Amino acid sequence: MAEIKTLSSKVVYQNKWMKVREDAIQRASGAEGIYGLVDKPDFAIILPIDGQRIHLVQQYRYSFGKRYWEAPQGAWEDRPDIAPEELALAELQQETGLRAGQLIHVGKQHLAYGFCTQSYHIFIAKEFAHGERDLDEEEEDLISQWFDLADFERMIINGEILDASTVNAYGLAKLKGMLA
């Protein structure tokens, strides 16, 4: 089993959402190199399901210069140790105004373990009460809407939903038989 040893580590960039570090490494063969990593706190992604409907949010994604539909999701950088269930319930309410009476943990996945330390917990939310949204400054343009599951699946197939975490979360829940 090949292991990689960290020789040193330095932060090369940091803001309130992420830290980028460069590690000097040594491979099992003795060869040395560098490895760049993005450190971000874990996030929760929520599939709000009501019968044959799913609730999605749409917002502008600066990195691609477009608006995209996706499942409600988020991290709390100021509370990186928050319990995933608490985070999921809070993010759902914050982005959609929905308060879930039932929360089911689907699983945990790594976002992009080739260069990023972030993982995410996937939840299905059910049994909703409606309340007010509490959007962050970065979410001021967020739109929230219900979709039929058949339309949602069509949006995935047609490439209208490009958020890999949303597609993965739904696919894992469906493969586990948790959407019936």
Image (cartoon, rainbow, N blue to C red):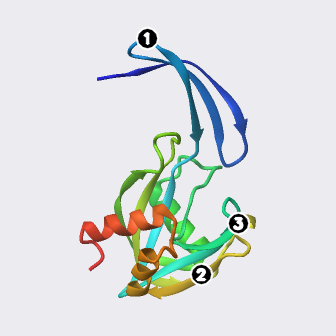
Q: Give percent across and percent down for residue 103.
A: 39, 70
Mark toward the start of the polypeptide (2 vs 3): 3
Mark 2 → mark 3, Cα distance in angstroms: 19 Å
Quadrant of the drawing holding the N terminus: top left
Name the front one of labels 2 and 3: 3
Toward the viewer: 33 or 146? Answer: 33
| Residue occupying image coordinates x 46% and y 54% | 120
Q: Give the residue at the far top of this rendering.
A: 30
Asked if disc 1 and disc 3 are in contact, CB closer than 8 Å, the reply is no
Mark toward the start of the polypeptide (1 vs 3): 1
Give the amino acid at mark 3. Gly
| Residue occupying image coordinates x 67% and y 73% | 134
Instruction: Examine the rendered structure and indicate whether residue 113 appears above or below residue 72.
Output: above
Residue 127 visible in the shown view: no
Q: Give percent across and percent down for residue 155.
A: 46, 79
Instruction: Examine the rendered structure and indicate whether residue 2 appears above or below residue 131.
Output: above
Give the amino acid at mark 1. Gly
- Sort mark 3 into few (<14), some (14-19) or many (20+) by Cα contacts within 10 Å: few
Instruction: Examine the rendered structure and indicate whether residue 157 appears above or below residue 12.
Output: below
Name the front one of labels 1 and 2: 1
Quadrant of the drawing holding the C terminus: bottom left
Determine whether, in the image, residue 156 is placed left or right of residue 77.
Answer: left
Residue 159 visible in the shown view: yes
Mark 1 → mark 3, Cα distance in angstroms: 43 Å
The residue under label 2 is 144
The residue under label 3 is 65
Q: Give the residue at the far left of this rendering.
A: 177
Q: Give percent across and percent down for residue 172.
A: 32, 64
Give the amino acid at mark 2. Ser
Mark toward the start of the polypeptide (1 vs 2): 1
| Residue occupying image coordinates x 37% and y 22% | 3
